[in-house]
């Protein structure tokens, strides 16, 4: 665990958990926008009716979210809550935050086209990060993927070409987390069956990237 200072690395559309003093229910929101070192903009916290009296300038809130295998937590203050033209909450940009990596093995960024077999259907996706234990996948909601509704713990099978191999490899895994961002799903998969050749290729890829960087 470490305490970091911004810039805040997070995608627009990331789901946020929000804590208010005196509120015990789970409150969620979505990051709508931000200007680095100035402010954050979030959607109205849900359920709004329960916490609306808390949305006054200067009130302290605690923000918690998961991004790229890391949990981030920080305190900030409300700048303003507006209801027109849209309901939005403006927050002060955090001066520091706590970051904790929840992955047992670091992942390496990549871009590997793949097919994901899920509930007897095949969906087109891209592996965006990978380790010996699992990977992250981006699946665009195309007509061919229109029936794609991922559920945690679902069993999946990946088919892709790894790092210069001529043949496709198959890897079995299970869905560990899901985020929907616009027309895309970001799906975290934990590997459950990796043969020796694929494992070695992933390991060599990690070593190459570390040496190159």
Image: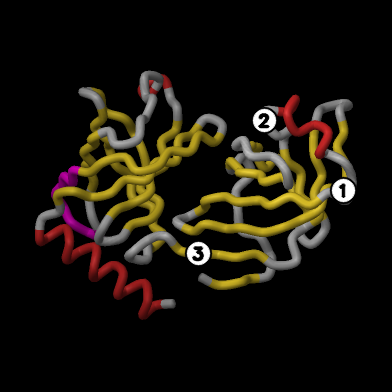
Look at mark 3 in the image and give the residue it sits on.
Answer: 100
Residue occupying image coordinates x 22% and y 59%: 164
Residue 24 in the image, given as x and y percentages of width and height: 64, 39
Q: Which residues are magenta?
A: 163-172
Q: Quadrant of residue 42?
A: top right
- In the image, is residue 34 above or below residue 157? below
Contact between marks 2 and 1 (CB within 8 A): the answer is no
Left or right? Give the position of 83 relative to 64.
right
Q: Quadrant of the C terminus?
A: bottom left
Residue 80 in the image, given as x and y percentages of width and height: 88, 42
Left or right? Give the position of 153 relative to 149.
left
Contact between marks 2 and 3 (CB within 8 A): the answer is no
Instruction: Tell which residue pokes out farthest to the left in this image.
Output: 196
Mark linked to residue 79:
1
Residue 151 in the image, given as x and y percentages of width and height: 35, 30
Look at mark 2 in the image and give the residue it sits on.
Answer: 46
Secondary structure mostly seen in magenta is: loop
Mark 2 and mark 3: Cα distance apart in space? 25 Å
Q: Secondary structure at mark 2?
A: loop
Residue occupying image coordinates x 61% and y 44%: 16
Left or right? Give the position of 185 relative to 17.
left
């Amino acid at each position: 665990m470490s305490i970091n200072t911004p810039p805040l690395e997070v995608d627009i559309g990331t789901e946020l958990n929000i804590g208010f003093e005196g509120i015990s229910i789970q409150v969620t929101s979505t990051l709508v926008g931000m200007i680095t070192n100035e402010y954050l903009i979030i959607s109205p916290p849900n359920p709004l009716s329960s916490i609306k009296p808390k949305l006054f300038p200067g009130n302290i809130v605690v923000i918690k979210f998961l991004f790229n295998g890391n949990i981030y937590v920080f305190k900030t203050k409300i700048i303003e809550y507006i209801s027109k033209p849209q309901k939005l909450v403006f927050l002060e940009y955090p001066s520091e935050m706590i970051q904790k990596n929840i992955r047992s093995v670091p992942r390496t960024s990549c871009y590997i086209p793949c097919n994901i077999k899920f509930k007897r259907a095949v969906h087109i996706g891209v592996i965006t990060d990978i380790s010996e234990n699992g990977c992250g996948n981006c699946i665009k909601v195309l007509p061919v993927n229109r029936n794609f509704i991922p559920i945690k713990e679902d069993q999946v099978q990946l088919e892709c070409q790894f790092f210069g191999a001529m043949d496709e490899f198959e890897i079995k895994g299970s869905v560990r987390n899901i985020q929907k961002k616009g027309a895309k799903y970001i799906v975290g998969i934990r590997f459950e069956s990796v043969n020796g050749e694929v494992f070695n290729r992933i390991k060599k890829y990690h070593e190459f990237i570390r040496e190159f960087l």
